[in-house]
Image (spheres, rainbow, N blue to C red):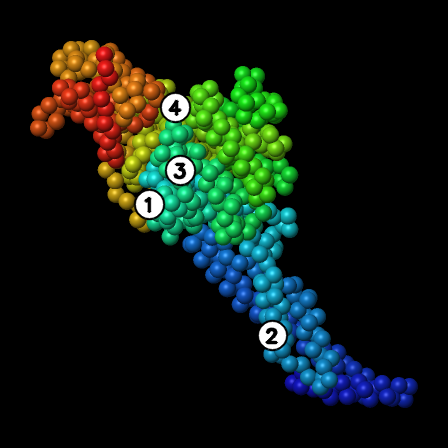
């Protein structure tokens, strides 16, 4: 009713102006009515605006729920302030008819919000603004580099499960943005996990190409990033200014903030990568002019940087990794971290200094002493090392498979089973929380991923086997025939069955021993090395053997070396 009388109030206002100085009492009353009308209209406009905003925010919440389920960012929303909407609605009061069109008010507010939606990118800034987040929020896009193998697929699924968990824990103001699994697979073909994990696929090195790199499959990582950067369609999904390079065996302990700055990337400080004078000659061969003092103890993962820095770094990271691998002296010196050295030398050559952070991740094993608070001291648990314990809770020993064993290498061709047995609740194991947390993290992920496959692989108990004793060797025709002999493993020489069950391999020392006789009769031996178990069927007459790896049945052929 008050709004309907606004036309009359305006006419009264006009009369008051015409009766100035002539006792305009009725005009003053009209003025009061006009003021009430304006205030009421403004209030209704504000209520209408917030109703519109409520609808849009509800839609935004549903989009976020879909984003959490699908794992990739949708366009984000940012809304104009209420005062802007009221000003827009108030302008309607001055139309020629003096009538307030409530539908026009609602339409105006809706159009204002829609315009803001259209003008906002997908980096997360819009959601953050709507949630009242700090204006200096700097979201980053996680790029998980991977190959499509059973070994890396189950790790990727665990990693992505915990990424989603920690992103949700961070809330709308967190800096963990979108996620992409960058997969080197055959000719860039999908592998079936893209429905669960947002994935893009690039071409992996062929077996012939990898043979040039001595089958060092990690060389696919810089090559994959190089292909991604060269593909505009792939890069279009990365709307954030920053990116993080992650690995499949990373598990987030807590929400990860953006630790980098625009001018200085952040990376983990690897304690086993510090350069010294002994490295200078190789560094000079690969990158003339670079001094060892400028090479930081960092790798490409975990690392956070701007997309622009990644563009600058990747060509030389790829180039230097190849050059190091093809250099026999460098290959022997840098070993399994060679590609990381390629990245570190490239960064030094380009003058891109990183923040080298010890708290970015941890790499604990059985010998560590991590309290329950370690989950608040680090951001990433990198399970590059196995945890090997005796059942009394004491560490099994260096390069030993434990009576209780949690090691990713056990599952090279088969998924780890669900509901893994936790470590012993005694001795050193009780004081070292990290293996227990990791075991729980694996169990949580496998339990909540609906199609986690059944597996014949062992759990955390049963991997340890005892080396053959001199007495056992003496009493076994097979063992006594192979002791002190040399064999080739898959065409690679250097496998030696030493005395007392001591095994020498091109990949380090191990042990060998006797298994229980097969059901059909006949002896069988085992060889255990590099955290993997192998059962061998030996044909002494032919001088050959067939190895079957425990857990996945992968076969390798062997042949006795010429005397």
Comes first in the chain, label 2 or label 4: 2
Q: Which residue is mark 3?
A: 205
Residue at (47%, 30%) from the top-left corner?
A: 322
Q: Describe the element under mark 4 as helix, strand or loop.
A: helix
Q: Position of residue 202 (x, y in %)?
A: 42, 45
Give the answer, above or below, for where 298 lies relative to 104: above
The quadrant where residue 258 appears: top right
Q: Nearer the viewer, mark 2 or mark 4?
A: 2
| Residue denoted by label 4 | 428
- What is the total number of numbered labels drawn onto the structure image? 4
Q: CA distance from mark 2 to mark 4?
A: 68 Å
Residue toward you, 421 or 285: 285
Q: For mark 2, give the secondary structure.
A: helix
Numbered mark located on residue 107 in the image? 2
Disc 3/disc 4 C-alpha distance (Å): 43 Å
Mark positioned earlier in the residue sequence (3 or 4): 3
Split into 4 quadrants, where in the image is the N terminus?
A: bottom right
Distance from disc 2 to disc 3, alpha carbons, whole Å, reads 56 Å
């Amino acid at each position: 009713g008050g709004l309907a009388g606004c036309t009359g109030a305006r006419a009264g206002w006009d009369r008051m102006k015409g009766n100035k100085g002539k006792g305009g009492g009725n005009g003053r009353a009209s003025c009061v009515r006009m003021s009430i009308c304006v205030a009421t209209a403004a209030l209704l406009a504000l209520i209408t605006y917030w109703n519109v905003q409520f609808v849009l925010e509800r839609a935004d919440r549903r989009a976020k729920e879909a984003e959490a389920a699908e794992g990739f960012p949708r366009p984000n929303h940012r809304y104009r302030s209420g005062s802007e909407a009221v000003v827009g609605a108030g302008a309607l009061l001055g139309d020629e008819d003096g009538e307030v069109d409530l539908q026009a008010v609602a339409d105006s507010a809706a159009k204002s919000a829609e315009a803001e939606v259209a003008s906002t990118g997908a980096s997360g800034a819009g959601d953050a603004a709507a949630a009242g987040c700090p204006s200096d929020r700097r979201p980053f896009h996680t790029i998980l580099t991977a190959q499509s193998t059973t070994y890396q697929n189950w790790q990727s699924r665990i990693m992505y499960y915990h990424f989603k968990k920690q992103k949700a824990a961070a809330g709308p103001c967190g800096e963990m943005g979108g996620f992409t699994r960058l997969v080197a697979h055959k000719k860039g073909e999908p592998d079936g996990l893209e429905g669960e994990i947002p994935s893009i696929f690039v071409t992996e090195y062929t077996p012939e190409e990898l043979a040039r790199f001595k089958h060092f499959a990690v060389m696919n990582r810089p090559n994959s990033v190089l292909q991604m950067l060269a593909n505009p369609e792939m890069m279009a999904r990365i709307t954030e200014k920053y990116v993080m390079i992650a690995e499949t065996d990373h598990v987030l302990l807590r929400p990860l903030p953006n630790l980098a700055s625009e001018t200085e990337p952040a990376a983990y400080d690897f304690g086993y990568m510090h350069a010294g004078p002994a490295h200078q000659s190789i560094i000079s061969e690969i990158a003339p002019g670079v001094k060892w003092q400028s090479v930081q103890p960092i790798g490409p993962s975990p690392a956070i940087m701007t997309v622009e820095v990644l563009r600058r770094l990747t060509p030389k990271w790829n180039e230097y990794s190849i050059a190091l691998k093809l250099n026999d002296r460098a290959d022997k010196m840098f070993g399994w971290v060679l590609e990381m050295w390629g990245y570190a030398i490239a960064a030094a050559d380009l003058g891109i200094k990183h923040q080298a952070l010890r708290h970015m991740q941890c790499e604990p094993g059985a010998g560590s002493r991590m309290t329950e608070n370690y989950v608040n001291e680090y951001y990433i648990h990198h399970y590059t090392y196995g945890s090997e314990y005796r059942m009394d809770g004491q560490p099994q020993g260096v390069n030993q498979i434990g009576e209780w064993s949690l090691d990713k290498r056990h599952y090279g061709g088969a998924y780890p089973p669900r509901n893994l047995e936790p470590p012993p609740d005694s001795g050193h194991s009780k004081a070292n929380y990290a293996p227990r947390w990791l075991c729980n993290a694996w169990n949580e992920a496998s339990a909540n991923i609906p199609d986690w496959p059944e597996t014949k692989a062992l759990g955390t108990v049963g991997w340890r086997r005892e080396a053959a004793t001199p007495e056992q060797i003496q009493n076994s025709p097979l063992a006594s025939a192979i002791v002190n002999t040399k064999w080739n493993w898959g065409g690679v020489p250097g496998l030696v069955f030493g005395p007392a069950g001591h095994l020498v391999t091109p990949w380090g020392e191990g042990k060998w021993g006797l298994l229980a006789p097969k059901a059909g009769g006949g002896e069988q031996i085992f060889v255990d090395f590099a955290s993997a178990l192998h059962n061998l069927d030996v044909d002494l007459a032919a001088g050959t053997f067939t190895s079957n790896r425990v857990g996945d049945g992968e076969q390798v052929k062997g042949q006795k070396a010429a005397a």
